[in-house]
Image: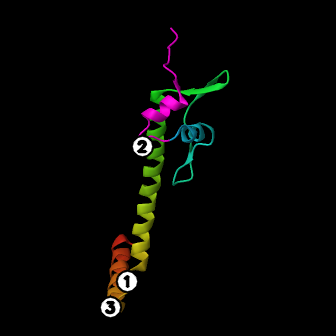
Amino acid sequence: MHETLEYLTLTDAAKLAPGRPSTNCIWRWCRRGVLSRGGHRVRLHHVRIGGKIFTTADWLDEFGRSLAAADVEYFSLDAEVEASRADLARPVNPRGREADVERAERALKAAGA
């Protein structure tokens, strides 16, 4: 059975979208998409019927969730990079360094290497 979708004009979609973006903004989301922080381009799914462009409330919701997911992925990776940079930027204490070397040598001997 064929599913019927309730299509929205871009003007109606703009009224439903959080923050009330302009109709032109919704058109850009359809045509160009939005570049997420991670560099992925996310586009609003749409159809062209005749000379008009339509979307649905579900597609608008999916667009927002996809963009948020792409940003979460980027910020998760960014946090991992920052944590590794913090470890590298830690000042080296000469006595602590010697203790680290001795500890590593003991671990190697215990492992049989």
Quadrant holding the C terminus:
bottom left
Q: Spatial distance from mark 3 to mark 1, Cα to Cα?
A: 10 Å
Q: Which residue is mark 1?
A: 101
Label tally: 3
Nearer the camera: disc 2 or disc 1: 2
Q: Spatial distance from mark 3 to mark 2, Cα to Cα?
A: 56 Å
Residue at image point 42% right, 43% down: 19
34 versus 48 height, above or below: below
Residue that protrudes farthest toward the bottom in the picture = 94
Q: Which residues are magenta?
A: 1-21
46 versus 75 height, above or below: above
Residue at image point 59% right, 41% down: 28
Spot occupied by residue 7 in the image (x, y as percentages of width and height)? 52, 22
Sequence order check: which comes first, mark 3 or mark 1?
3
Spot occupied by residue 70 in the image (x, y as percentages of width and height)? 48, 47
Q: Which residue is mark 3?
A: 95
Q: Is residue 53 visible?
A: yes
Spot occupied by residue 17 in the image (x, y as percentages of width and height)? 44, 37
Crowd around label 2: few <14 · some 14–19 · many ≥20 (10 Å): few
Disc 2 residue type (three-letter)? Gly
Q: Is residue 10 left or right of residue 95?
A: right
